[in-house]
Amino acid sequence: MQPYTLTALRDALGNVDAATRKTARMPRHSFTPAVEERDYLGWRDPSAPQRGYIFVDGVSGPEGIMLTKTRTRNSVKRAVMCEFCRIPRRFEQVALFTAPTSQLQRDQSTLGTYLCVDLDCNARVNALRPLTPLDPPAEELIAARRQQLAQRSLAFVRDVLERASQR
Ligand SMILES: [Zn+2]
């Protein structure tokens, strides 16, 4: 990802109204991995923890969406997989996020997907190492997974934005 200002990121949120865009906050921590080492930029809002943001590099700047983390049912204790990085994780490390598909608040339509709770798939993907001697070297492994991560995150953001633009 390229680095962007908070103003540019707020303006890029295409699935919420202007008033909601203004309330988006940057995380209090610095990004690890760094923004440049990420295939999408995501974080949970420090002032509204159920809220998250995902941004991808668009043709002429960032493209982004706001999502809401749904409450997890603690009875479901199984391994789950994030739809972006596809790395199996413990159930509490993956959550269902729903993104509004309309800028109109009265319109309740959403699109949902399971994602790493901290919206930081690159922390896992960039740390991948070969598990057996038959696996490709780490750089190849990571490069291939990062390409898939970039494609999946871009596809989801575009899907939400496309629906939002039609309402
Ligand atoms: Zn993930």
Image: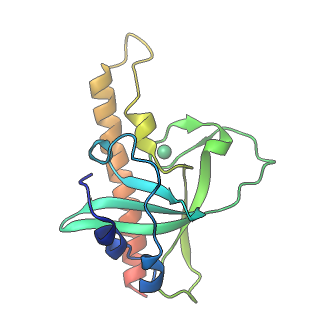
Give x and y (percent) for residue 133.
38, 10
- The quadrant in which the C terminus is found is bottom left
Question: In terms of depth relative to the viewer, which is nearer, 99 or 111?
Answer: 99
- Residue 146, compared with residue 111, is above or below; it is above
- Residue that lies at the very extreme toward the right in this rendered image: 75
Give x and y (percent) for residue 100.
52, 75
Give the residue at x 52% y 66%: 67
- Residue that lies at the very extreme toward the front in this rendered image: 28
- Residue that lies at the very extreme toward the top in this rendered image: 133
Relative to residue 123, is residue 113 drawn left or right? right
- Residue 87, compared with residue 15, is above or below; it is above
Count of numbered marks: 0
Give x and y (percent) for residue 92.
67, 44
Give the residue at x 76% y 46%: 76
Question: In terms of depth relative to the viewer, which is nearer, 132 or 23?
Answer: 23
Q: Quadrant of residue 126?
A: top left
Give x and y (percent) for residue 102.
47, 82
Give the residue at x 41% y 27%: 128
Question: In terms of depth relative to the viewer, which is nearer, 33 or 77?
Answer: 33
- Residue 8, compared with residue 32, is above or below; it is below
Give the residue at x 57% y 49%: 117
Colour mapping used in the image? rainbow
- Residue 14, compared with residue 134, is above or below; it is below
